[in-house]
């Protein structure tokens, strides 16, 4: 049984920092690209960042470039997303997902991802 579990969401002030963690069980993470997505109030889900199977390639949404950093540890079956300099616009439910399609790249399109977690809430106050 595959389980994807996010943690680390919290209420923070503008300019604050958070690290979100995603732990996966039931999958060999060596065979999956991983992505972080978010959905804010009244907004559509958007891809925030993704990382290839080996961690050699990562992609970021324009809103995340320079502020967020994705990393992974396949031995521990974890994927982290470091959020720096948070803004109220970053308030959203953040989701982690696994994708078997890409080998040496990753996509910010949620359509390709097969396994999803339940999300962790990030709220940024002004």
Image: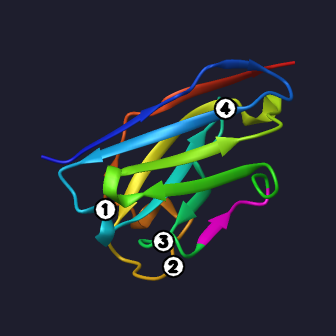
For image coordinates 53% across by 65% down, the residue present is 51
**Disc number at residue 29?**
1
Residue marked by disc 2: 105
Q: x and y percent of residue 77 in the render?
A: 33, 51
* Residue 29 lies in quadrant: bottom left
Label located before the other in sequence (3 or 2): 3
Give the SS element for disc 3.
loop
Can residue 28 be found in the magenta stretch?
Answer: no
On screen, 107 above or below 39?
A: below
What is the number of the mark on residue 104? none
Q: Percent from the top left, x then y, of residue 36? A: 53, 51
Q: Residues within 10 Å of mark 4 (few under 14, many from 20)?
A: some
Q: Is residue 102 left or right of residue 18?
A: left
* CA distance for labels 3 and 2: 5 Å
- The residue that label 4 is drawn on is 18
Q: Are marks 4 and 1 in contact (CB under 8 Å)?
A: no
N-terminal of the pair, mark 1 or mark 2, is: 1
Q: Earlier in the sequence, mark 4 or mark 3?
A: 4
Q: CA distance from mark 3 to mark 1?
A: 10 Å
- State the CA–CA distance, disc 4 to disc 2: 25 Å
Q: Which residues are magenta?
A: 58-62
Task: Using the image, tell me which numbered label, if any, was put on residue 52.
Answer: 3
Q: Is residue 36 left or right of residue 32?
A: right
Left or right of 61 on screen, residue 102: left
Do labels 3 and 2 touch, CB within 8 Å?
A: yes
- Give the secondary structure at mark 2: loop
Identified at 67% across, 53% down, the residue is 69
For marks 4 and 2, the one nearer the N-term is: 4
Q: Residue at x 48, y 39 (%)?
A: 21
């Amino acid at each position: 049984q595959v389980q994807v579990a996010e943690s680390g969401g919290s209420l923070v002030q503008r300019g604050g920092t958070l690290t979100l963690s995603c732990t996966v069980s039931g999958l060999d993470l060596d065979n999956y690209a991983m992505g972080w997505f978010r959905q804010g109030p009244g907004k559509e889900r958007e891809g925030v960042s993704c990382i290839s199977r080996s961690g050699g390639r990562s992609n970021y949404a324009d809103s995340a470039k320079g502020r967020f950093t994705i990393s992974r540890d396949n031995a521990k079956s974890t994927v982290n997303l470091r959020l720096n300099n948070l803004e109220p616009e970053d308030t959203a439910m953040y989701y982690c997902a696994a994708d078997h399609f890409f080998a040496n790249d990753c996509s910010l399109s949620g359509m390709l991802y097969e396994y999803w977690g339940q999300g962790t809430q990030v709220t940024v106050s002004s």
